[in-house]
Amino acid sequence: MIPIPTDGKRKRVFIRTYGCQMNVYDSDRMADVLRSLGYALSESPEQADLVVLNTCHIREKASEKVYSELGRLRDVKAGRRRNGGDLTIAVAGCVAQAEGEEIARRQPAVDIVVGPQAYHRLPQLLAEAERRSAFRRAGKRLPGAGVLDTEFPAESKFDHLPAPGGVRAGAAYLSIQEGCDKFCTFCVVPYTRGAEYSRPAEAILQEARTLVAAGAVELTLLGQNVNAWHGEAVDGSTWSLAWLIRALAEIDGLARIRYTTSHPRDMDDDLIAVHGEVPQLMPYLHLPVQSGSDRILEAMNRGHGRDLFRRIADRLRGRRPDLALSSDFIVGFPGESDADFDQTMRLVEEVGFAAAFSFKYSRRPGTPGAALADQVPEAVKAARLAALQTLLAHQQRAFNRATLGSSVPVLFAEAGRKPGQMLGKSPWLQSVYVEGPGSLLGRIAEVELLEAHAVSVAGRLTSSFEAAA
Ligand code: 5AD
Ligand code: SF4
């Protein structure tokens, strides 16, 4: 074990998180592990003894950011060493998993490389890095570069990590599922996060109760394929996500439930029904479709066509008429023609989205898509992305406008940019600004939505909160 420093000074760790909410969750769990080793959280790398980069590998740009940050950290480390100090650098997350050896080669200043399935082994890895550092100070060298752990261990990290402490202003993430067996041909996730794994229902319910007791009023269930979750229940039967949501809705004090990210193929009837049945389940669903062309969906190995997506959207809205949909889109997948792209634009028009993320296809080494011959030129991708984003931005604004005049519960997550302003989330995950006191933080209050902006809405607290405050 890494000793808690005895010189009276607590060691400090800075964790930088890239990418998706799974990484945000994992960073919290790493912080929990490190806290149990005596580390305090630091606000900047400059004040830290240990820096952890929790990395994302989903698109090329995300990976490249990591290497440039590592270059910066190498300089900080070199400066420290000149003054007799040191800095331990750890790379975690999906770049660590996918490019472990490569990281050590490209940036020898890195001490630890740890994949997403091995975070519970951080204490041992730090101890090993510490041993190496002691050897270095004594003028000796251990063979090899840094410390590398990118195994997919047989034991689950969930059974070995300390209880979570990650409630932020009333909201918390809860990881229920990891990994992916779907192998979309553009995607690195099955390689970086490994095979699909569902946590047992009771472990999830227990974690949920702990989080609610610690002040969470909103839980977002996380998984790369969250609606593929199927877990063992206490009575030995297998639950689907629909049943897990019903059980979570029984927890007193839990006002809001969300889940992300889903796959259309796993949107079964029961899960769709739950949207009309459980009031705590928020009327917002992120359901990536990627493309509106059947031909491209097939080449992407998505396992469904545009019609199935449309039918799911209709059925969800049949159960929950105010449901807002968001999605992910990729433009310029190999072989995508103008006509294919047009199908995507038309699907967007037909379905209507409240929010969306859209990306140019990024060729990821090792995925089947990278080997396809018919790569789309960069300029074509850029033009398509611009057209799609214009349409999606227009829809987001229209959605925001359509909500004006309604009064909705908003969970306040942070102070706004201007003094006296607070920022929260509506049930439809809109960012909502109000004039209001700091005491709103972590609380749900009724807000009348008044003014729509591109990516946010301004509102005003209704008197019911002022009376309650
Ligand atoms: N290129 C572009 N976008 C990608 N995504 C995943 N892999 C790639 C890639 N190679 C997008 C998908 C996914 C989101 C998380 O990232 O839209 O849903
Ligand atoms: Fe990637 Fe497809 Fe799995 Fe989503 S479903 S994580 S896009 S392989």
Image: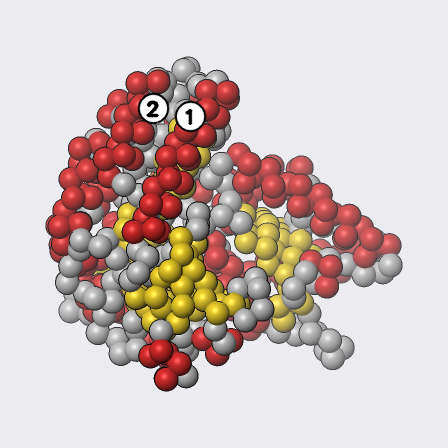
Q: Is residue 303 above or below residue 19?
A: above
Circle 2 SS class:
helix
Disc 1 secondary structure class: helix
Asked where in the image residue 144 lies, by quadrant, the reply is top right
Q: Label 1 neighbourhood size at 10 Å, few (<14), some (14-19), many (20+)? A: many
Tell me if mark 2 has few (under 14), some (14-19) or many (20+) residues whose alpha carbon lies within 10 angstroms of its own.
many
From the viewer's perspective, tell me whether residue 309 is left or right of residue 135: left
Is residue 184 visible from the viewing direction of this image? yes
At 55% from the left and 54% from the top, the residue drawn is 17
- Residue 253: where, in percent of width, then height? 30, 78
- Residue 349, x across and y down, in percent: 27, 34
Residue nearest the viewer, comparing 152 with 22: 22
Amino acid at pointer 2: Phe
Quadrant location, the N terminus: bottom right
Report whether residue 261 is seen.
no
Q: Which residue is mark 1?
A: 384
Q: Report whether 110 appears left or right of 7.
A: left
Residue 374 lies, in percent from the top left, at 41, 15
Q: Are marks 2 and 1 in contact (CB under 8 Å)?
A: yes
On residue 341, the disc is 2
Sequence-wise, which precedes: disc 2 or disc 1?
A: 2
Locate residue 44 relative to residue 216 in the image: left or right: right
- Numbered marks: total: 2
| Type of the residue with mark 1 | Arg
Gap in angstroms between the C-alphas marked 2 and 1: 7 Å
